[in-house]
């Protein structure tokens, strides 16, 4: 959640350096970076720009960003992209309010997730994902192939 946000923001990439502030427990990355010798920027293989263009929910603004900031969200996103070989997404959401009640936020997130899954179904990304993902065993009742219309 981004307390200052007025829109849902779909983040495309995360940066390795520039972390000066400590988190809530006082942790501050050494030398202000996520991974020593890691790439300066890691972008998601999922086109969040395409997702943001596909999404429309009346009463909710959805925007695209290439800068998730320099705090816990961006740090976590960078590590998720690194360990997930580029297959991760970060969605910043504004706080619940009169103009954005839980029901409307839930509907917007549902539409965003569906659009993200459609983006994952693109043949080039599906192939990339299959080649770059580690094997996983889904929890009972969860089907990993559901993302791609398989199973």
Image (cartoon, grey):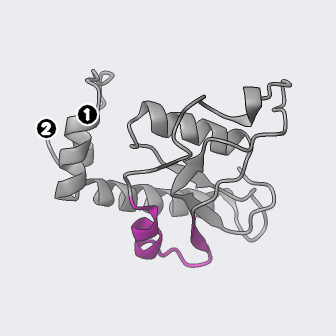
Callout 2: SS: loop
Q: Is residue 59 rendered magenta in the image?
A: yes
Judge by depth and name the residue closer to the eye, 82 or 109.
82
Magenta highlight on residue 81: no
Q: Residues within 10 Å of mark 2 (few under 14, many from 20)?
A: few
The circle drawn on residue 50 is: none
Quadrant in which residue 7 is drawn: bottom right
Image spot of residue 35 (x, y percent):
59, 30
Q: Which of the 4 quarters of the picture holds residue 129?
A: top left
Identify the residue shown where x is 37% and y is 62%.
115
**Residue 72 in picture, x, y percent from top left:** 71, 39
Give the number of the disc on residue 151: 2
Is 30 situated above or below 110? above
Left-right relation of 90 to 112: right
- Which range of residues does the magenta coloring cover? 47-65
Asked if 64 appears above or below 18 in the picture, the reply is below
User: Which residue shows up at 48% across the image and 48% down it?
Assistant: 89
Quadrant of the rendered structure where residue 67 is? bottom right
On-image quarter of the C terminus: top left
Secondary structure type for disc 1: loop
Q: Is residue 90 left or right of residue 29?
A: left
| Disc 2 to disc 1: CB gap under 8 Å | yes
How far from the left and from the top, in percent, is residue 139?
Answer: 33, 22
Q: CA distance from mark 2 to mark 1?
A: 7 Å
Measured as percent of width and height from the top left, residue 16 is found at 61, 41
* Residue nearer the viewer, 123 or 54: 123
Q: Which residue is mark 1?
A: 143
Height in image: 99 above or below 145? Answer: below
Q: Residue furthest left?
A: 151
């Amino acid at each position: 959640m981004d307390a200052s946000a007025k829109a849902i923001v779909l983040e495309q990439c995360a940066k390795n350096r520039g972390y000066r502030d400590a988190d809530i427990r006082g942790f501050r990355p050494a030398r202000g970076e996520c991974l020593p010798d890691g790439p300066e920027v890691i972008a998601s293989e999922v086109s969040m720009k395409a997702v943001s263009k596909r999404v429309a929910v009346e009463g909710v603004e959805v925007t695209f960003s290439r800068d998730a900031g320099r705090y816990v969200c961006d740090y976590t996103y960078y590590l998720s992209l690194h360990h997930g070989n580029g297959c991760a997404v970060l969605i910043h959401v504004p706080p619940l309010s009169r103009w954005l009640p839980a029901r409307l936020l839930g509907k917007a997130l549902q539409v965003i997730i569906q659009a993200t899954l459609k983006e994952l179904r693109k043949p080039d990304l599906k192939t990339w994902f299959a080649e770059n993902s580690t094997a996983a065993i889904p929890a009972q009742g969860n089907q990993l192939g559901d993302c791609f219309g398989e199973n």
